[in-house]
Amino acid sequence: MPGMTTHVGKGRFFQLVDQKLRTPTQQGLDDLRAGRSVFDLGVEASIIEETDEERHHVETEVLGEEEDTGAWWPTISEKEKVLRIAYVHAYELALTYGNPKPIVTLCVRGIKNDEREVFEVYVEETDHEIHVIWVTGGTSGMGDAPATENTYPQRLWKIGTDEDIDRTWARYPTTGEYDDFSGPETKPGFDGVKILNLPSY
């Protein structure tokens, strides 16, 4: 999952997924249909590193079920199948065109439902792209940004009141790692509202 300080994020992981799926291929669809593990496909595509930590993150934290210690959404079953079918459907839509449409992924975190945990995936087709949207509950992995050198700007902007944007920007350390980012900005004629290009890590 992406490094996120907000409910909506792209992050390094999904940016790499987007790069891989900029031009969907029949082979990619065949690999998904063949039932190969999401982790193995991610490693092969250079999206995930083949380490114990990354395997734990993918197979236990994200995809794990009730018996798996550390699962973020333990009561939701068949998460890997849900994701696999979502991307199979996205591929199928994309490949119906002579020039396949790019597949773009976005993550929405922290959705609350008092009755159950939330792990949902949506596929949307637009005139130019296929969107895969992960919608999940909880805030595991979402909080103050770490002091790390592995920072970069997302092509994602948050717009909100001065108070809201200043509060978001305050979640990034002031120890130098995020000095290259512009921080909150204003637009002439829109007093009381700011825009923030969200860093990720």
Image: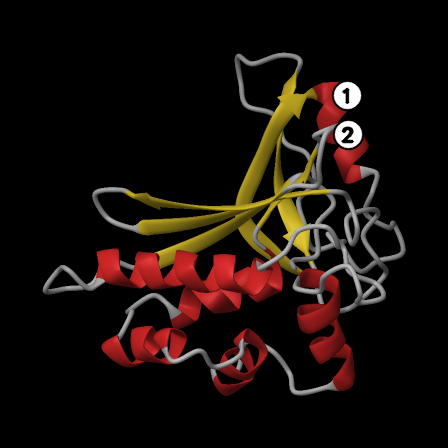
- Image quadrant in which you'd find residue 118: top right
Q: Nearer the viewer, residue 92 or 189?
A: 92
- Image quadrant in which you'd find residue 39: bottom right
The C terminus, quarter of image: bottom right
Q: Nearer the viewer, residue 85 or 18?
A: 85
Q: Are marks 1 and 2 in contact (CB under 8 Å)?
A: yes
Q: Residue at x 77, y 59 (%)?
A: 66
Q: Position of residue 45 (x, y in %)?
A: 47, 82
Q: Nearer the viewer, residue 135 or 100?
A: 135
- Label 1: how many Cα within 10 Å (few below 14, some 14–19, many 20+): few
Mark 1 belongs to which amino acid? Glu
Q: In this rendering, would 113 be left or right of 32?
A: right
Secondary structure state at the residue bearing disc 1: helix
Rendered image: mark on residue 177 = none
Rendered image: mark on residue 166 = 2
- Label 2: how many Cα within 10 Å (few below 14, some 14–19, many 20+): some
Q: Which residue is mark 1?
A: 163
- Asked if residue 84 is positioned above or below residue 137 in the image, the reply reads below
